[in-house]
């Protein structure tokens, strides 16, 4: 008989409780728990450009897809952009043009992303800004341009202080020594904004301003938490000396404002062999370009490599190198890591450097490197399960009115040959659903509601059909949105077989994470879960599959202030408590559990209504609770 184990954890309201990451610098090496580590990985610069840490919840499916894919290939690192050009986040005062604080989901999204990465033994380079700060014509919120005055002010004393005091320090304190945090990376390619380093942005500034800002930011991070590592991502290794200790201190005057290690980028289309980290060793480069002896990660390079079909004679580089050779040469050349560009949602970025490529060559190359060098890469053992196979479906669980799910295709679908748009919908809720189809059309992303709706009675499955023939601009459909406008609806709807005419756009059979995401400004309260499932009777956290591994393995219930959980298998489990606004207010447990029965206490929670999420043992289960 299994013994009852009681785990009563203090809530994390207003506190951070993380173990130290164990990542340190020794000479030109990075070490993890005292052992040299090589960061083999990818970039997921964004899943939603500029918006990953803004007002909306994290697109968990896109993030998990990239992190899991990186780890499945034997990798251990991913690089992620945060505020980028400041068009969506942080919050900026419209009058003073000063940063006033993070957006509502900034910290929650960072924590969730890092928590997912930690599950897989992957560490994240958290990049604060990019050279796009100096592109005044980039879009802000929908039809508004970014606030270029605020961006320019960021590099003045008043603006730098506002960012550090109102955003940087609160964020750094909230994230703490998270196990998945590799580094706070100040910039992506800051040289692009300069007048001295062949800068290319529309607006430019003196290099000294960027050095001063980097010095102040690094000092603030090190002062707030001396254990954290700070870096920056240089566009070209020939400029690396500008980020030396002496250069930064001279510019900003802060002794603690130095970088712990360096990152450099390399693209053969524009950069020749002389600056290639894949042709020259790290030691050779440090001597040649006079930068400090610190660890160097190759933070970006083409996932395709540049050899054979992916090489062109007009490239600046003349030495052809495959992706597998890139990772191998980086490892053998004394570099601390290599991160391929980039793991975007559909795994393809067209016409970058003059040709199309996918992330697949990088994943294969990482797998080959891990087969020989796993001891220098692996952070922890992870069991990654494949899809269940069979007929995949998208389960969307609704918790609030007017909720929307959206799929964006920035290349666009040409739906001009189709006159009808169809999909199946199974309503596993207890009240009727009313589904509307919305397109965003043309390069203006014009919001276009189609005529009519699809009513889905409780417990029934219907085939929805909408006439789209009146929309002349459907030849460039950039977004598909399903909106449920049934007042008061809560429950799960199963979507499948989404078609334009006879063309299937989504059947959800191939990729367990290729799902729609929450619509703009939709919270986790409005849509608690979006998930690919293999059971049309699925409701959030539950499945009717009699032989399902998850259903047989775990049980979850709440009795008063006690959460009861039993499992037949060991695994990673987290117990999170959400407020009714969709934000995490407490984490009661996050760690490994063996087979057995467990109790978690809600006794320390203030009175009120919450949603408890039990995540682990292969499933996600949620249940509302009213603490009296």
Image (cartoon, grey):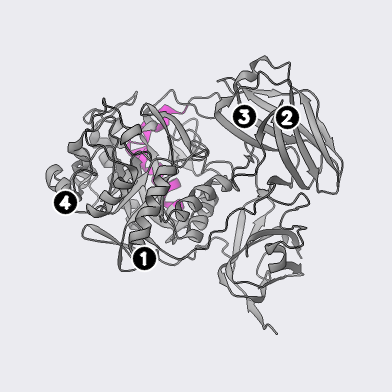
Secondary structure state at the residue bearing disc 2: strand
Q: Which residues are magenta?
A: 146-171
Q: Residue at x 15, y 42 (%)?
A: 289
| Above-or-below relation of 514 to 594 | above
Task: Decide: is 188 above or below 624.
Answer: above
State the residue position of label 2.
437
Question: On residue 12, which mark appears?
Answer: none
Dot label at residue 479: 3
Q: In this orientation, which residue lies closer to the viewer: 122 or 521?
A: 122
Q: Name the residue tied to disc 4.
A: 283
How far across and down, in percent of the image, does residue 214 sit?
30, 44
Residue 317 position (above or below residue 384): above
- Mark 1 or mark 2: which comes first in sequence? 1
Q: Picture quarter containing residue 320?
A: top left
Q: Position of residue 462 (x, y in %)?
A: 83, 38
Above or below 475: residue 428: below
């Amino acid at each position: 008989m299994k013994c009852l184990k009681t785990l009563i954890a203090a809530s994390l309201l207003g506190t951070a409780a993380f173990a130290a990451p164990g990542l340190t610098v020794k000479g030109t090496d990075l070490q993890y728990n005292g052992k040299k580590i090589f960061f083999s990985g990818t970039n997921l610069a964004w899943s939603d450009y500029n918006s990953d840490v803004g007002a909306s919840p994290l697109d968990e499916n896109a993030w998990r897809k990239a992190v899991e894919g990186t780890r499945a290939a034997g990798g251990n690192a991913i690089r992620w952009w945060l505020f980028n050009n400041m068009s969506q986040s942080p919050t900026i005062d419209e009058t003073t043009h000063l940063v006033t604080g993070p957006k509502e989901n900034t910290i929650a999204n960072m924590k969730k992303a890092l928590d997912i990465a930690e599950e897989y033994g992957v560490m994240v380079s958290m990049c604060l800004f990019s050279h796009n700060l100096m592109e005044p014509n980039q879009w802000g919120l929908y039809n508004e341009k970014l606030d270029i005055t605020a961006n320019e002010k960021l590099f003045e004393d008043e603006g730098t202080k506002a960012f550090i005091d109102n955003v940087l320090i609160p964020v750094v304190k909230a994230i703490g020594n998270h196990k998945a945090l590799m580094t706070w990376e100040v910039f992506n390619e800051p040289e692009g904004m300069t007048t001295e380093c062949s800068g290319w942005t529309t607006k430019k500034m003196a290099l000294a301003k960027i050095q001063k800002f980097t010095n102040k930011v690094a000092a603030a991070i090190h002062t707030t938490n001396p254990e954290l590592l700070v870096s920056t991502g240089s566009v070209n290794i020939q400029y690396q000396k500008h980020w030396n200790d002496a250069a930064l201190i001279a510019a900003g005057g802060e002794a603690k404002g130095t970088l712990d290690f360096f990152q450099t980028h390399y693209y053969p289309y524009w950069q020749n062999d002389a600056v290639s980290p894949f042709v020259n060793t790290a030691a050779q480069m440090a001597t040649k370009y006079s930068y400090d002896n610190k660890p160097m990660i190759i933070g970006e390079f083409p996932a395709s490599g540049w050899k054979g079909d992916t090489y062109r004679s007009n490239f600046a580089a003349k030495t052809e190198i495959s992706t597998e050779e890139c990772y191998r040469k980086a490892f053998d050349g004394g570099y601390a890591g290599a991160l391929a560009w980039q793991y975007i949602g559909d795994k393809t970025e067209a016409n970058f450097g003059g040709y199309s490529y996918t992330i697949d060559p990088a994943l294969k190359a990482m797998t080959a490197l891990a087969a020989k060098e796993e001891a220098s890469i692996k952070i922890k053992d992870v069991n990654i399960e494949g899809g269940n196979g069979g007929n995949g479906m998208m389960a969307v669980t609704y918790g609030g009115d007017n909720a929307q799910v959206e799929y964006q295709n920035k290349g666009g679908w040409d739906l001009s040959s189709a006159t009808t748009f169809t999909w199946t919908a199974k309503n596993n809720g207890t009240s009727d659903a009313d589904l509307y189809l919305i397109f965003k059309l043309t390069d203006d992303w014009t919001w276009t509601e189609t005529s009519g709706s699809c009513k889905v009675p409780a417990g029934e499955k219907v085939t929805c059909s909408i006439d789209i023939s009146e929309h002349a601009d459907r030849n460039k459909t950039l977004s598909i949105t399903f909106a449920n406008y049934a007042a008061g609806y809560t429950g799960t709807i199963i979507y499948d077989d989404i078609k334009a005419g006879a063309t299937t756009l989504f059947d959800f059979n191939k990729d367990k994470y290729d799902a729609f995401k929450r619509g703009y400004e939709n919270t986790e309260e409005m849509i608690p879960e979006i998930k690919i499932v293999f059971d049309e009777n699925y409701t959030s956290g539950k499945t009717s599959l009699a032989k399902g591994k998850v259903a047989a393995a775990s049980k979850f219930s709440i009795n008063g202030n006690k959460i009861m959980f039993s499992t037949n298998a060991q695994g990673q489990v987290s117990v999170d408590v959400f407020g009714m606004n969709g934000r995490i207010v407490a984490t009661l447990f996050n760690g490994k559990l063996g087979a057995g029965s467990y109790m978690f206490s809600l006794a320390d929670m203030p009175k009120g209504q919450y949603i408890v999420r039990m995540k682990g043992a292969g499933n996600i289960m949620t249940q509302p609770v009213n603490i009296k």
